[in-house]
Image: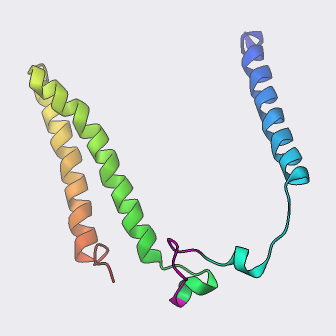
Amino acid sequence: MLLNYLPVLLMSGFAAFMAGMILYVSSILSPHHPYREKLTAWECGMEPVGDADTGHFRVHFFIIAILFILFDVETLFLLPWAVVIADKSISLLAYIEMFIFIGVLAVGLVYAWAKGALDWI
């Protein structure tokens, strides 16, 4: 039974070995010439200002990014549901499940809004 998984194990081992070798060879052959200007924070082509100059970024930016990804994934789940609704071949259980899903995300959005996570300061 376990011999059936041998090709998968060999392929995984080969892939891990190749990834490790590529990283190792890259670390040996790549040029290493760090200097102050190269190591500074970069903000869209402008000079870094405030805390970004020292490499510290506000957590608020990452919260906005996570919320964006969350609602982007919601759109990915809603698109197939909308296509099935157009065919009118969806059950009542699917309607209920999707409205629960939308409700949970709506509660999350209201919570984030109430906490001020969407205010760009």
105 or 66: nearer the viewer: 66
Percent across and percent down for residue 78 are 23, 39
Q: Quadrant of the C terminus?
A: bottom left
What's the residue at 28%, 72% (across, down)?
118
Give the residue drawn at x 52%, y 73%: 45
Q: Residue 101 falls in which quadrant of the image?
A: top left
Q: Work out whether residue 120 or residue 110 is closer to the camera in this orientation and state it.
A: 120
Q: Nearer the viewer, residue 32 or 66?
A: 32
| Quadrant of image for the N terminus | top right
Q: Is residue 56 above or below residue 18?
A: below
Please tell me which residue lies in front, 13 or 4. Answer: 13
Q: Residue furthest right?
A: 28
- Determine whether, in the image, residue 74 is placed left or right of residue 91: right
**x, y percentage for residue 55?**
62, 80
The quadrant in which residue 54 appears is: bottom right
* Residue 15 covered by magenta stretch: no
Position of 41 with respect to 44 (left or right) is right
Number of callouts: 0
User: Which contiguous range is marked in magenta?
Assistant: 42-50
Relative image position of residue 37 (x, y in whole percent):
71, 79
Residue lying furthest front in this view?
A: 45
User: Which colour assignment does the render follow?
Assistant: rainbow
Q: Residue at x 27, y 44 (%)?
A: 75
Give the overall secondary structure of the magenta segment: loop
Q: Residue furthest bottom?
A: 50
Classify residue 66 as left or right of residue 25.
left
Residue at the location (26% across, 61% down)? Answer: 108
As for residue 48 lying within the magenta part, the answer is yes
- State the image coordinates of residue 71 (x, y, percent, origin top left): 30, 53
Residue 111 versus residue 86 in the image, above or below:
below
